[in-house]
Amino acid sequence: MRCSFRFGWLSFLTLSSLAVISCALSTPGEASQGESEYVRLREEMVASQLEARDIWDRTVLKAIRVVPRHLFVPARIRPFAYQDHPLPIGEEQTISQPYIVALMTQLAAPKSHHRALEVGTGSGYQAAVLAGLVEEVYTIEIVPLLAERSRKVLADLGYSNVYARQGDGYRGWPEKAPFDLILVTAAPGTIPEPLKEQLAEGGRLVIPVGKTWGIQRLMLVTKRKGKFEEKVVTSVRFVPMTGEVQRQ
């Protein structure tokens, strides 16, 4: 799971915030923070960033309450893990703003019997949130280092219903299709046809679409009776999708 943020909701990082995070990244050792404090920060995040906005799905809120977001970011910036903005996770990638994770999850309408596909594992945080809501999560990451790191974090935390692999997610995971929901955390210029084809009947695809590093549209695609209904949800900015999509 990668970038990013919603225009109109994001409190952009101030210069002082950037300076603090930059300092944390360059200073040896992890800032001291007890687990009880992380629990408090997580509860505060859910109340002020999600419930206070338009995240109303109680199952989504419950799932986010139990996932230790701070364990999915570099140790030196864990004190910032529950703040209202994306954070760097290395390899020029980010973990998305908590609100965007919640919004995309809510739009996907996960149920306990569902099978989910995530394109762009990133830190592994979105996959962990989904793991508490659906039967199986299949997640693909194109960056080898991130794929290895997120797989280890998910395994160490006991997410046994998450199946991760390194590769190009443009064509999805056809041998495991169809999927009840698909979340894409990097932006292609157009919606990849292979992902639409892998949606189950009634399935929902949540994906940012638009030009590289420009303002993009967060789209909800629903499959009904073999046809696809597309809806623009909001404006966002995500890292670009790479791999085969670049050749399309």
Image: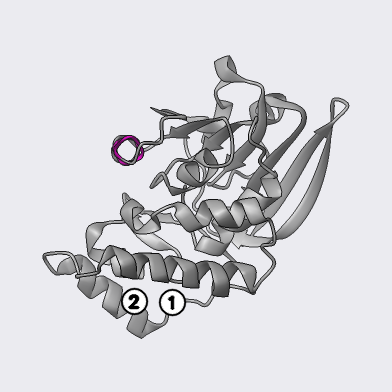
Q: Quadrant of residue 48?
A: bottom right
Residue found farthest to the top? 175
State the residue position of label 1.
13
Kind of element beneath mark 1 = loop
User: With 234 as the anchor, is 32 left or right in this view?
Assistant: left
Q: How is the image coloured?
A: one colour
Residue 19 position in % (x across, y down): 28, 79
Residue 155 covered by magenta stretch: yes
Q: Earlier in the sequence, mark 2 or mark 1?
A: 1
Q: Amino acid at mark 1?
A: Leu
* Residue drawn where x is 26% and y is 72% of the image: 22
User: With 34 as the anchor, is 214 left or right in this view?
Assistant: right
Residue found farthest to the left? 28
State the residue position of label 2.
18
Residue 108 position in % (x across, y down): 68, 44
Q: Is residue 127 above or below residue 244?
A: below
Q: Are marks 2 and 1 in contact (CB under 8 Å)?
A: yes
In the image, which residues are magenta?
Answer: 150-156
Disc 2 to disc 1, C-alpha distance = 6 Å
Q: Amino acid at mark 2?
A: Leu
Q: Quadrant of residue 222?
A: top right
| Quadrant in which the C terminus appears | top right
Decide which of 155, 141 is in the foreground and name it: 155
Task: State whether residue 190 appears in this view.
Answer: no
Q: Is residue 150 above or below residue 25?
A: above
User: With 22 as the anchor, is 15 left or right in this view?
Assistant: right
Q: Main secondary structure of the magenta part?
A: helix
Residue 59 position in % (x across, y down): 63, 51
